[in-house]
Image (cartoon, helix red, strand yellow):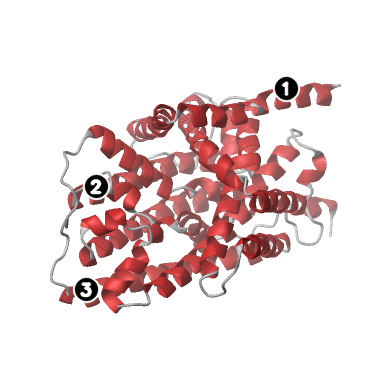
Amino acid sequence: MSAKNIRELRRAIGLPQATAMVVGTIIGASIFVQPSEITGKVTSVIGVFLVWLISGLLTFFGALVCAELSSIFTQTGGVYVYLKEAYSPSIGFLWGWAMFWSMHSGIIAAIAVIFARYAAYFLPMRDASIKALAIAAIVIISGINYIGVKQGSRLQSLFTLGKILAIVFIIVAGFVLGSGLPHHFVTGDIAPSHLSVSNFLLALVAGLFAFGGWHMVTYNSEETINPQKTIPRALMLGTIIVTLCYIALNAVYMYVLPLSSVASSSRIAADAADALLGSGGGAFMSALVVFSTFGALSGIILCGPRVYYSIAQDGLLFRWIGRIHPRYRTPSRAIVIQAIWSSVLVATGTFRTLFTRVVYTEWIFFGLMAIGLFLLRRRPDIVRGYHIWGYPLVPILFIFSSFAIVANQLVSNIAESLFGLSLVFLGLPVYYLWSRVKKG
């Protein structure tokens, strides 16, 4: 194998795998467990549908922004590359810094623990065993991705297909078996309340968080076949599929249960299954969450190391992190360090603090990314393979929704917000110190 081939990532991700990556990383556990975040704030059936529809639409707008940017920049790294090109390497570095130490590694740890907790329904375990299983899941999936992107993307596609089939089964079974229930789409004994703009925005924020992960497919550009066309199509197809799934699932929940039960439930899929099938909803829901979280974990573990690889290739991290495995042609060392740090977060339990306090900060970068689209359009050297539909209204609406999430977090909990911001901006002195050392 030539030195050139050794340095290159292997292109093995087509449109089906890329679309599965979008769908699989978005659909995790929350839609099966706790839609009460939205239903508790919007106490009407029409209002709940409206929140999910608008959340899906705004996510689609974000996907359109990424679609144009991904058609311009086909380097691996996605959002990191877009921020670096639109602003400066320091802003891109901050994204990667926050990803590794908290946002991305934290969500890997959180989903791994959710996977292990629901697996404990079938294999009773104590806390130590749950942590061990969560770490084992991280290591196994990281190992699969280590030996090849084709293997990793196939695993992701398999679990996404299974997840979609399970959702279709729930939807069909819900409307067929639930037709014999006496009432459908009723509020129950939930306290009627006037729908305020504030509550609707809070519900919308919760809905947008349920769509998290849509952007991760952009991290794998250099491993995607014809990325200028494949990634934009995958982003649009994937967000549309997820939006339809979310709306249909919530329709089933409210078809078989009163709105008051949906609002108070912390395991809505199980409660809906109990209403349809009798006892046994717990086993059904647990199996579904185990399957879904494992699939989501596969996609998230696959995507993250590509950002760290790209940063290292730019000389902003240790060069050895950007090494391509000579046989498997994967960013092997970036995969290893991600697995190690995510496992540390699981073992220590610190992912809870980091994730809950810092995850909202990614929306600052999403807003900046959309603003960057306007800045990049001014550059005469930019060649776009895709022109965003609805420009400039679509990116403006996405910018507004991104900063609305940030403002909501700042207002609701100033102390945690400042902690999250300080952790992110701690990357700036590290960046400038690294730059000075590099020059020296």
Q: Which residue is mark 1?
A: 432
Question: Which residue is located at x 70 percent, y 50 percent?
Answer: 344
Q: Is residue 164 shown above or below 239?
A: below
Q: Which residue is mark 2?
A: 50
Q: What is the secondary structure assignment of the residue under circle 3?
A: helix
Q: Position of residue 122 (x, y in %)?
A: 53, 75
**Circles 3, 1 touching at the beta carbon (< 8 Å):** no
Q: Amino acid at mark 2?
A: Leu
Q: Is residue 78 visible?
A: no
**Of marks 3 and 1, which one's residue comes earlier in the chain?**
3
Report the Cα–Cα distance between label 3 and label 1: 60 Å
Locate residue 80 relative to residue 174 in the image: left or right.
right
Q: Which residue is mark 3?
A: 178
Report the Cα–Cα distance between label 2 and label 1: 45 Å
Locate residue 37 relative to residue 27 in the image: left or right.
left
Q: Quadrant of the N terminus?
A: bottom right
Report the Cα–Cα distance between label 3 and label 2: 23 Å
Q: Is residue 54 shown above or below 26?
A: above
Q: Position of residue 145 (x, y in %)?
A: 68, 61
Instruction: Classify mark 2: residues with Cα within 10 Å, few (<14), some (14-19) or many (20+).
Output: some
* Residue lying furthest right: 440
Question: Which residue is located at x 47 percent, y 31 percent?
Answer: 373
Which residue is more in the foreground, 78 or 106?
Answer: 106
